[in-house]
């Protein structure tokens, strides 16, 4: 209840004594509970209640008129209070229910248009009597997009999808390789204190707002415009954006991107630093922060991983990769293939493109190329990518190449090409997002790629008498040896003497491999029209100190026909599985709000080497304040680090209890999570 100040008038004058913005009821009706403790938060196109206690005499709607004014920046709109409901969704309206016309206090239902601009509004009321008008500032409210309203451009018609893509405050990110998909939890944190206000500030400090405030406010009615502004503001390449990217491996002046576990810490740090970029982010961090901002603003969003994502610098839809005659991958092209790349899909209609392009739109906030003069990418309709509509706004050619480019593999020695093959299916082989209502992945590959198999095929430039394949027995866990299986097929009617070269390199997910750390050579004899199997083993001791980043390896084999000099190559990229942290919630995973609970978190060092300066961190948005950390100077092989943590859930719903173990021997942390259900 807010008490208003007013100038002294005669006792018979009608004045505003109190106003109640009915925050709890409005937040419940508008699906905005928990988004802010400072502001009323409502969604466009749906009425919200304002209750006013008038003083001086009984309000008579036949004699007095109430007029509301909603102000956004320097813009304002007057909203006369009517005695009947206005059914229009194209203009602001306010009305008093028939049964409440002569009651005290007076309840007015205010409704914005379905295409009203998003932002922080001030609200005034004017009491117009025969003897003049009295005006009162009665508070402010935040207006968001409304995916529950069929007339809103972000309307998504299924309740389970609205719960997942708007209200859910945690997600699962998919990383690694198609052979070993790693599930990583992420806390979107949209219900944490101050996050909504920080997300609004992203719009306020954008270059678009600085250059033309009124124009920016007007354009905020359009989710296409909002998404491009946010996409550009998540990175800081040409504005006061949220995150600074860094793929150098040197994170001395900031945070290693692998350390982040949620968006809220990043957004709060950006807000506290007077909007200075937070150091550092990589693709999954950029995408996850953008997903948080879009969900806060009411635009359904999800984080999507593309495995084997192409960056086609010259736009010819061909990515070239080069290997030496001994199977070492070398960097000779500006094009690249990331083992995984993460971007965002947002749901909205696209009237600017005509029919057939509504629904999920790709937005990539990771700075790679400029779009319309700014570092953003999209929104581009997924349906447009599937239909190969390169003319669809925005950035369709770049996004299409990311999931559909061909890969040309070339074997070279001293500048001469010794062999060449084309793979038409490797790029975008798997496209995944978190499934609705579960922690498992949902495949989106068929949504992007029309009538195409997800199994890789290889086309040879010429008919060859040799074929080779390379597989691993199983994805190794850290500490295990790597078992390689190489199969050679002789399609000729003559026996062959072959030279085998096998090569292993470590690599980052977004770059070329580093130097060779293990190799093997062998002479082979194969009979006419025969199949030969060769086994190799890479000991753990060979790679334990070599891994970088996400623990990725590139292994290749080159088979050479000693007589004809014909060469064929097969390669495989895979990631090493990290060991698990045990998380056990004492008493089970169904827990009560505002009651103290505890969990036992432990990790046993299964490596053959000790872990130095190991730090076990436990955290959980909505479950515990801050982070609980335990440090062990040296964790010997077979030794266990264990911690009992206590926590008191503050909000209901499904929450994540996360644990991570960082240690000096590795640039990345070991991570695990446990999902809990909090009830009132």
Image (cartoon, helix red, strand yellow):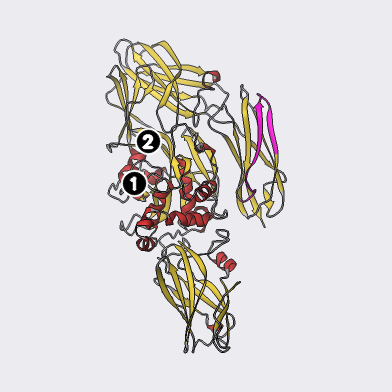
Per the image, the residue denoted by label 1 is: 385
Q: Which percent across, then down, holds residue 175?
A: 48, 37
Residue 24 position in % (x across, y down): 59, 66
Q: State which region is magenta.
A: 622-643
Residue 79 vs 517, above or below: the answer is below
Where's residue 40, x and y in %? 54, 65
Is residue 196 left or right of 606 when viewed as pictured?
left
Which of the two residues, 104 or 571, is positioned nearer the viewer here? Answer: 104
Q: Is residue 304 visible?
A: no
Q: Which residue is mark 2?
A: 427
Residue 552 point in image, percent of width and height: 48, 29
In the image, is residue 376 part of the stretch drawn in magenta?
no
**Residue drawn 52% across the image and 83% down it:** 98
Q: Is residue 576 left or right of residue 395?
A: right
Crowd class of label 2 (few under 14; some 14 to 19; many from 20; radius 10 Å): many
Label 2: state its secondary structure: loop
- Front residue of 159 and 218: 218
- Name the residue: 56% across, 86% down: 102
Horizontal side of 591 relative to 253 (left or right) equals right
Q: How many marks?
A: 2
Judged left or right of residue 476, residue 446 is left
Q: Which mark is residue 605?
A: none
Seen from the viewer's position, the closer of residues 69 and 503 is 69
Mark closer to the chain start, 2 or 1? 1
Cα separation between marks 2 and 1: 14 Å
């Amino acid at each position: 209840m807010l008490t208003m100040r007013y100038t002294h008038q005669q006792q018979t004058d009608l004045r505003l004594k109190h106003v109640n913005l009915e925050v709890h009821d409005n937040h419940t009706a508008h699906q905005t509970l928990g988004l802010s403790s400072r502001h009323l938060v409502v969604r466009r196109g749906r009425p919200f209640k304002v209750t006013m206690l008038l003083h001086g005499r009984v309000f008579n709607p036949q004699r007095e008129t109430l007029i509301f004014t909603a102000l956004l920046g320097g813009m304002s709109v007057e909203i006369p209070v009517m005695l009947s409901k206005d059914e229009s969704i194209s203009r602001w309206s306010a009305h008093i229910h028939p049964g409440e016309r002569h009651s005290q206090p007076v309840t007015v239902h205010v409704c914005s248009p379905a295409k009203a601009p998003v932002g922080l509004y001030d609200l005034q009321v004017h009491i117009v009597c025969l003897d003049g008008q009295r005006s009162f500032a009665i508070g402010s409210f935040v207006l968001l997009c409304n995916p529950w309203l069929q007339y809103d451009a972000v309307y998504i018609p299924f309740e389970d999808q609205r719960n997942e893509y708007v209200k859910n405050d945690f997600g699962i990110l998919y990383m690694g390789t198609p052979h070993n998909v790693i599930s990583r939890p992420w806390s979107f944190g949209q219900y944490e204190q101050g996050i909504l206000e920080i997300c609004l500030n992203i719009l306020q400090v954008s270059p678009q707002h600085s250059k033309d405030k009124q124009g920016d406010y007007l354009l905020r009615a359009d989710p296409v415009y909002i998404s491009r502004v946010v996409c550009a503001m998540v990175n800081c390449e040409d504005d006061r954006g949220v995150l600074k990217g860094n793929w150098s491996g040197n994170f001395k002046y900031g945070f290693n991107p692998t350390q982040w576990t949620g968006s809220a810490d990043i957004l709060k740090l950006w807000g506290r630093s007077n909007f200075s970029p937070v150091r550092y982010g990589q693709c999954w961090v950029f995408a996850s922060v953008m997903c948080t901002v879009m969900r806060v603003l009411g635009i359904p969003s999800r984080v999507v991983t593309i495995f084997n994502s192409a960056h086609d610098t010259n736009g010819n839809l061909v990515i070239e990769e080069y290997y030496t005659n001994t199977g070492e991958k070398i960097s000779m092209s500006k094009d690249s293939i990331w083992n995984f790349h993460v971007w965002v899909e947002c749901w909205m209609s696209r009237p600017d493109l005509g029919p057939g392009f509504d629904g999920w739109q790709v937005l990539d906030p990771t700075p790679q190329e400029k779009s319309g003069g700014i570092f953003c990418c999209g929104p581009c309709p997924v349906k447009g990518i599937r239909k190969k509509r390169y003319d669809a706004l925005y950035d369709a050619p770049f996004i299409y190449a990311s999931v559909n480019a061909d890969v040309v593999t070339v074997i070279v020695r001293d500048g001469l090409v010794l062999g060449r093959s084309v793979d038409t299916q490797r790029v975008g082989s798997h496209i995944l997002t978190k499934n609705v209502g579960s922690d498992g992945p949902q495949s989106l590959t068929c949504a992007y790629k029309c009538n195409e198999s997800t199994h890789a095929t290889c086309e040879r430039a010429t008919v060859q008498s040799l074929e080779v394949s390379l597989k691993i027995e199983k994805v190794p866990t850290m500490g295990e040896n790597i078992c390689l299986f190489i199969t050679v097929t002789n399609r000729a009617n003559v026996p062959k003497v072959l030279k085998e070269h096998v090569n292993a390199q470590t690599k980052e997910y977004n770059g070329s491999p580093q130097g060779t750390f293990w190799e093997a050579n062998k002479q082979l004899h194969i009979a006419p029209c025969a199949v030969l199997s060769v086994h190799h083993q890479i000991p753990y001791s060979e790679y334990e100190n070599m891994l970088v980043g996400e623990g990725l390896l590139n292994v290749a084999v080159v088979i050479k026909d000693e007589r004809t000099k014909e060469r064929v190559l097969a390669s495989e990229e895979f990631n090493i599985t990290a060991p698990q942290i045990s998380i056990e919630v004492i008493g089970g995973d169904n827990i009560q709000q505002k009651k103290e609970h505890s969990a036992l978190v432990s990790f046993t060092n299964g490596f053959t080497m000790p872990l130095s300066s190991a730090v076990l961190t436990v955290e959980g948005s909505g479950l515990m304040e801050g982070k609980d950390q335990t440090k062990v100077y040296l964790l010997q092989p077979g030794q266990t680090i264990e911690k009992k943590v206590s926590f008191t859930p503050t909000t209901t719903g499904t929450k994540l209890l996360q644990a991570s173990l960082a240690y000096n021997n590795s640039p990345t942390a070991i991570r695990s999570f446990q999902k809990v259900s909090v009830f009132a």
